[in-house]
Amino acid sequence: MPNQRCRSTTSGRDEVIQDTITSILSITMEHSPFYSVRPLLPVYPEPDNLTASKKRWILIRDNSVIYLKKEGSGTVIIEDPRPSGLISGEPVYLGIRDEIIYYAGELSSDTPLPGDWNLSPVRELSGLIPDTEMAIASYAVRILDNDRSTAFCGRCGAKTHPLTTERGRICRACNRIFYPRISPAIIVLIKKGEEILLARSPRFPSGFFSILAGFNEPGENLEQTVHREVFEEVGISVQNIRYFGSEPWPFPDSLMVGFVADYAGGEIRIDDVEIIEAGWFSRDNLPSYPQKTSISHTLIKAWINREV
Ligand SMILES: [Zn+2]
């Protein structure tokens, strides 16, 4: 009997473990983030033995990138090994892809653009250049912006220098290291029976809705951020928060962490500041929602397909 009871307990535990694994597998998707820069590998130390013909450039002015419009799909990749006279300051190493080393360069403010190249805000290039180039260009803008912001030490004011072992800058006067800032934010699909909650920010065009999102604050874990943001923005409570997937969002430095949660109680009460309209929507009355480049789109599509 003791053995049987023991087996029974073990079996029960195994079932619980199996149920948990099944539950996790059913909700956690291998999300393919649009703005991931893999396989642009940040190999350190920066290779110095590659020939000039294996270097490529992305040139940036503020948050804009120069690109060449082409029939079909344009490009932001410059093959000139060293675009002489075009950049100010030192080239910024981005990483390696297919044995080609990529750099970003700050375009001098008074330099005329070469040939048929144009300057465009990076976000407006989506669809005009290949998706991989879009991810690399957004990354380049983000890294250059970070380098500008940390060019001088925030503690002692001395000039900082790139680390040679990883992405970051160091102040040699006080040894403080500045890594690129990453701002975690949650994004959550809230289910209530056969409906989901969608909301409209004042930034959205009329008729356009998305799921709720908000930044993590110091002292919170991500689940607490979900509870707080949902309550602040629409006045309801949620339960059964499950991880879905994540993606980098380089405008300028977010890591979006996606969750699914169930409605737990309360009536929708919008704050009229961050949210100006919110409601429950079924699959047959969905409004316009974000395009394929974002995890909000993936979450909503997964729900439409009954995958979450
Ligand atoms: Zn310092």
Image: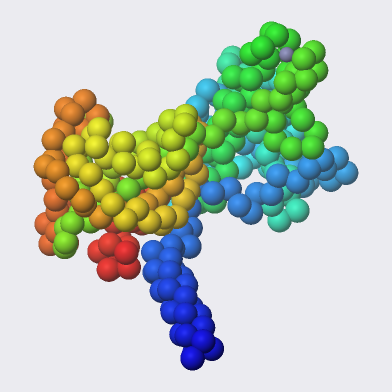
Q: Can you name the residue that lies furthest to the right here?
A: 49
Residue 144's place in the image compared with 277, above or below, is above
Residue positioned 88% across, 44% down in the render? 49
- x, y percent for residue 229: 30, 36
- x, y percent for residue 45: 82, 40
Quarter-wise, where is residue 225 in the image? top left
- x, y percent for residue 301: 30, 60
Residue 200's place in the image compared with 16, above or below, is above
Residue positioned 14% across, 43% down in the render? 266
- Specify the quarter for ligand 1: top right
Quarter-wise, where is residue 274 in the image? top left
| Frontmost residue, 18 versus 251 | 18
> In the displayed structure, does residue 31 sit left or right of residue 174?
left
- x, y percent for residue 81: 75, 38
Quarter of the image with the C terminus in it: bottom left
Residue positioned 64% across, 20% down in the render? 150
Number of callouts: 0
> In the displayed structure, does residue 289 sit left or right of residue 114?
left
Residue 25's place in the image compared with 102, above or below, is below
